[in-house]
Image (cartoon, rainbow, N blue to C red):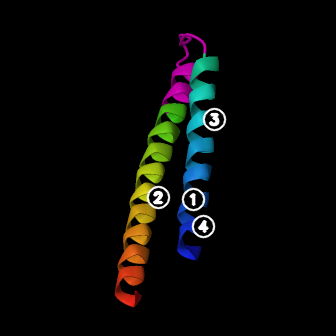
């Protein structure tokens, strides 16, 4: 059970990053002729994708640790 703490923490951190990126996107205005707003929107979209990938990776770690715990419990007894 102790091995689940780190992936759970990673899931929470990823969810917070995803929500922050989504918030940044919703606050973005229409692109200006200079393109500066477009760059900020692109940065937020990349951050959102990275947060999703991190969340997915932590989910896989969580599932693997859970399976290992079940296997150990079944082997012991």
Front in this rendered view, residue 54 or 3 = 3
Q: Residues within 10 Å of mark 4 (few under 14, many from 20)?
A: few
Q: Which residue was labeled with disc 2?
A: 58
Instruction: Find residue 52 and report its horizontal and vertical position in percent.
Output: 45, 43
Pointers 1 and 4 in contact (C-beta within 8 Å) = yes
> Which residue occupies 54% across, 33% down?
44
Magenta residues, start to end:
29-42
Q: Which residue is mark 3?
A: 20
Which one is closest to the eye, mark 2 or mark 4? 4
Dot 1, how many residues are within 10 Å of its Cα: few (below 14), some (14-19), or many (20+)? some
Could you say where residue 14 lies in the image, as x and y percent from the top left?
56, 48
Q: CA distance from mark 1 to mark 2?
A: 7 Å
- Numbered label tally: 4
**Residue designated by label 4:** 5
| Nearer-N-terminus badge (2/4) | 4
Q: Where does the image place residue 17, in percent across and percent down from the top left?
A: 60, 43
Q: Position of residue 8 (x, y in %)?
A: 57, 59
Task: Tell which tag, 3 or 4, sits nearer the viewer.
Answer: 4
Label 2 secondary element:
helix
């Amino acid at each position: 059970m102790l091995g689940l703490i780190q992936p759970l923490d990673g899931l929470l951190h990823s969810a917070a990053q995803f929500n922050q990126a989504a918030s940044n996107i919703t606050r973005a205005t229409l692109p200006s002729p200079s393109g500066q707003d477009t760059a900020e929107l692109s940065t937020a979209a990349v951050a959102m994708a990275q947060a999703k990938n991190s969340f997915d990776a932590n989910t896989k770690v969580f599932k693997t640790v859970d399976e290992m715990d079940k296997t150990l419990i079944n082997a012991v007894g």
